[in-house]
Image: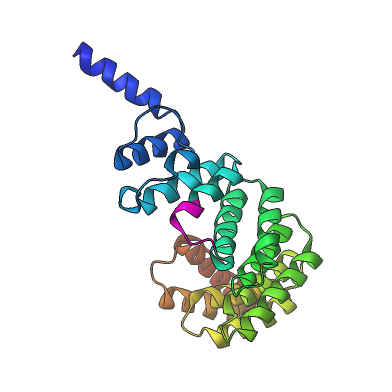
Amino acid sequence: MIIYSVLTINRIDVWRGPVELWSDAVRKHSGLSGPGPLASGDLTGQRPLQISGRLVTALAQAYARTGNIGEAKALMSIIQKTDKETETGSELTFARIAIDEGRLEDGLRLARKAAEGGTWLSADGWGLIGMIYAKQGSYDAAREAFNKSLEIYKKSGRSGARIMQDLGLVELLAGKPEEAADWYSRSRKEAPKEAGPVMGLAMAYEKTGLLKESLALYQEVLRLEPDHPQKMAIAGSIALLEKQIEGAERR
């Protein structure tokens, strides 16, 4: 029991954080020795069959979460081709991690590099920039970024429904529900089977006082997606709108 306890303590000491945990996993898979964080230089020269792309990607993401973007990129370059598209994809991944971690300035810097990369992924870079500006309350800048993203989507022949939803949300946050409703309606036309645009349009109509229309749309959301993540909140909105409509009809 004492031996097992010591071994357990040693293992926990190795896994003091995500970087150490994934470093240990990559070492074991690659047959490397030594404790502590694993750097990209430790993998240089390893045969491809000895390297797990999944584990190295997890390690790169762990480094990104600590703010060490340079080491994260170096690790990703080992398992991916170093072309412009791959580089942009990595920058988008690390930008999303930075945003999730609340490091908005780091996220903005990385997203801007992706947006200016000149690949089809630039649209996602502008989308992330718009998201960051929206979080910061800079709605004019958010609109500009989302519109640039939408323009790239259209030029590449892809659906811009998701970006239209983002523009709708910006208008809701900016206190302009009529403009929001317009964007959500356009998104709904492009993606008629998706619940997202319907949900946004329901919220916009509710804020403009179109209660019956809003109620019908909330009900449609649950028909389209019965297990919607916000199912309880939607049910609450439906119940509240029914009471408001009933009260207005009595008066």
Image location (x, y in percent) of residue 249? 62, 79
Which colour scheme appears in the figure? rainbow
The residue shown at (34%, 35%) is 32
- Outermost residue to the front: 45
**Taking 57 as reference, is 164 left or right?**
right
| Residue sitting nearer the eye, 103 or 193 | 103
- Outermost residue to the top: 2
For the record, the magenta segment spans: 76-82
The residue shown at (66%, 55%) is 110
Residue 250 visible in image:
no
Residue 78 magenta-drawn? yes
Image location (x, y in percent) of residue 226? 39, 71
Quadrant, the N terminus: top left
The residue shown at (79%, 65%) is 141
Q: State how many labels appear.
A: 0
The residue shown at (49%, 38%) is 39
| Residue sitting nearer the eye, 5 or 137 | 5
**Taking 66 as reference, is 113 left or right?**
right
Residue 43 magenta-drawn? no
Q: Quadrant of residue 173?
A: bottom right
Image location (x, y in percent) of residue 119? 62, 73
| Residue sitting nearer the eye, 82 or 36 | 82
